[in-house]
Image: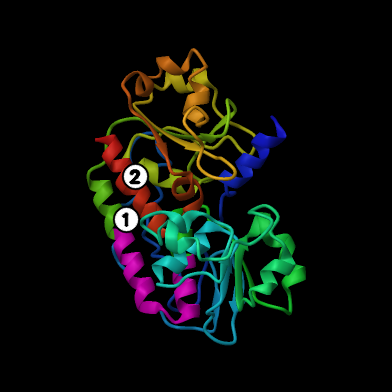
Amino acid sequence: MSRRMLMLRKARRWTAAAVLGTLLAGCGTTAADGEGAGKGGAGDGPATDLTVRPIAAARTVTDGKGVTVTTAAPPKRIVCLVALCDDMLAELGMVPAATNSALLSHEKFLGKEKAAKIPVVPGGFLSPETEAILSYRPDLVIGLEDTHGKLAPALKGATVFWPLQPGNWQDSVGYLRDLAALTGRTEQGEAAEKAFRAKLAAAEKSRSDRTALIIFGSDENFGVATPGNDVTAGLMPKIADYPWKSRGVEGTYSMEEILAREVDVLFVETLSFGGPAAPGERLSDKLAKNPLWSKIPAVRNGRVHEVDAEVWAKGRGTRSLGIVLDEAAAALR
């Protein structure tokens, strides 16, 4: 496997998170939430619980991974090193002091004009510069544990660093609730959770029998998004036939295996660097060179959808996942 593909996998896949543990009062998700439903998914489970427990403002929270975060006052200047942070702030009615994600440019977030006014952290997602991060005078920095955890020693004493590592939508909701508690924006947090749970429950009721697949990459080397390794893929068994299961960090599916599953609807995430891929440079364009590609039912029937990777692959918060549900439901009809 090429070094480039390994980098793409790291950008796309967040390692499977442990089941949510015990959280402080007012934080966490509902224990009744299921993790998949119907044939071919991650297993049958109960329908999404619509219950939203009250969130209490707090100066200290312990997240579902057991990470304890304490801030002296409600954080106002938050630097986002991972798109989930931007998503949560948007849901809480806040904007980051700086970010390295393009998620906020999406029309259902801030839009291009407003998002362009937010400073961009030099170094990109994989190597954000510590000195630059601190120059924004953050009272909280939120990053991804397996990518940004190495920054913790350099940030210690200068600011508060919170490493996230979600593996499913329940984790994302738990993080949202924790951030709502820290910022004191409890009503906004409850409203965002309520809206997402309602949307997911509605999508479950109109579940499609079509076989769906999410693939990601930037060239002929592609990966398959699977529940347990990918937050977005974890939603798919609830709304469609999604027979894809994790094969570990290095494992993936061949084009022959995908053809054999007779995929009805394909969602394609082109992971490009430096802006959206131009026509002809998208992953689906590259895969069209493979003679097996045209034999896949979804390709033959014009049901291949190039989706916004900023939302589908990187957002992973309640607003991003809500967009995914809307777009997926429309494509699966």
User: What residue is pinned by disc 2?
Assistant: 238
Q: In this view, does 68 lie above or below 256?
A: below
- From what the image shows, is residue 174 above or below residue 322? below
Say what amino acid the circle numbered 2 marks: Lys
Residue under circle 1? 48
Q: Decide: marks 2, 1 in contact (CB < 8 A)?
A: yes
Q: Position of residue 33 (x, y in %)?
A: 37, 57
At mark 2, the secondary structure is helix
Amino acid type, mark 1: Thr
Residue 53 visible in the shown view? no
Q: Is residue 230 magenta?
A: no
The vertical placement of 214 against 153, above or below, is above
Front residue (pair 163, 234): 163
Helix, strand or loop at mark 1? loop
Q: What stretch is highlighted in magenta?
A: 175-197
At x 44% / y 82%, what residue is drawn? 184
